[in-house]
């Protein structure tokens, strides 16, 4: 038979094990929730390349303008986001910076302190600005020199044997390459914000907010009345903001 002291000890041990099991189950639930958030973040991110990498060379020449001014975006929406057909990549990181400054979000703990993390964000914004500038220069060069390569150019060497259609297609192919670079840079900025800058929970909130902001801009653009008459696009509409 067990003495009274042994029964008490076994009773306490049983309670302790029960508490441990309860805490472990609670911890496991939290871990599963964290893993679920991580999966949802990755799933949401993976949906953006289908949008940001959709710039494939169109089958018809008349479809090329859709790369610069997508028909699925309203005119006022294009005015708000206009940088080669969609969001300017640095604006994505600027939005993250503004949310952090308003204390809405927290920086990722990957840096040793908040100052280091803010320095990381500033550095990323600076690097994205540089890449934007390179893409801008490529587009400006195409705009400035394409007339020389077109078949009706007075300075073109017509003895080259190239057909008029192939000359035009070659210039449109250059535009397609620049648009593709812009789309890839957009996704890069979004991925950096989510994976390198923000905490996991804030990254999830940011993706929700980002989609919400896009939706609000679209709704506001839909409500705006466009002025009558032809649209006017500046010759160098793709330079820095």
Image (tube, rainbow, N blue to C red):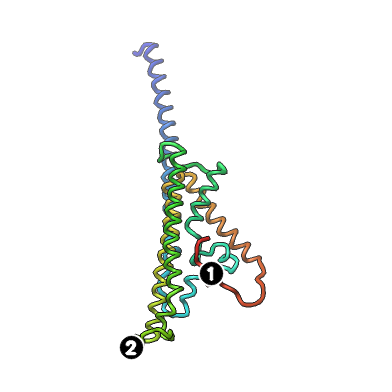
Q: Is residue 140 above or below residue 166?
A: above
Residue 173 picture location, percent across and down: 39, 74
State the residue in front, 186 or 145. Answer: 145
For the question of whether residue 33 can be seen, the reply is no
Determine the residue positioned at 43% across, 86% down. Answer: 152
Q: Which mark is residue 72?
A: 1
- SS state under label 2: helix
Number of numbered markers: 2
Residue 94 picture location, percent across and down: 51, 51
**Would you say 101 lies left or right of 18 here?**
right
**Would you say 90 lies left or right of 157 here?**
right
State the residue in front, 183 or 1. Answer: 183
Q: Is residue 105 above or below residue 186?
A: above
The mark closer to the camera, 2 or 1, is 2
Q: How dense is the environment of label 1, judged by Cα within 10 Å: few (below 14), some, or many (20 and up)?
A: few
Residue designated by label 2: 159
């Amino acid at each position: 038979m067990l003495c009274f002291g042994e029964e008490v000890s076994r009773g306490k041990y049983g309670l302790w094990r029960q508490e441990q099991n309860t805490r472990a189950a609670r911890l496991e639930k939290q871990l599963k929730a964290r893993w679920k958030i991580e999966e949802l973040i990755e799933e949401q991110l993976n949906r953006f390349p289908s949008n940001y990498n959709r710039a494939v060379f169109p089958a018809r020449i008349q479809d090329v303008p859709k790369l610069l001014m997508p028909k699925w975006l309203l005119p006022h929406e294009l005015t708000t986001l206009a940088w080669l057909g969609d969001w300017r990549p640095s604006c994505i990181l600027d939005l993250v910076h503004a949310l952090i400054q308003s204390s809405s979000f927290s920086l990722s703990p990957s840096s040793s302190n908040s100052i280091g993390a803010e320095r990381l964000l500033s550095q990323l914004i600076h690097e994205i600005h540089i890449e934007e500038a390179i893409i801008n220069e490529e587009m400006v060069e195409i705009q400035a020199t394409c007339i020389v390569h077109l078949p009706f150019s007075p300075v073109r060497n017509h003895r080259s044997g190239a057909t008029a259609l192939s000359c035009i297609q070659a210039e449109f192919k250059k535009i397609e390459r620049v648009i593709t670079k812009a789309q890839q840079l957009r996704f890069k900025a979004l991925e950096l914000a989510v994976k390198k800058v923000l905490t996991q929970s804030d990254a999830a909130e940011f993706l929700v907010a980002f989609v919400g902001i896009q939706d609000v801009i679209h709704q506001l653009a839909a409500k705006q009345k466009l002025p009558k008459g032809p649209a006017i696009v500046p010759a160098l509409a793709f330079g820095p903001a």
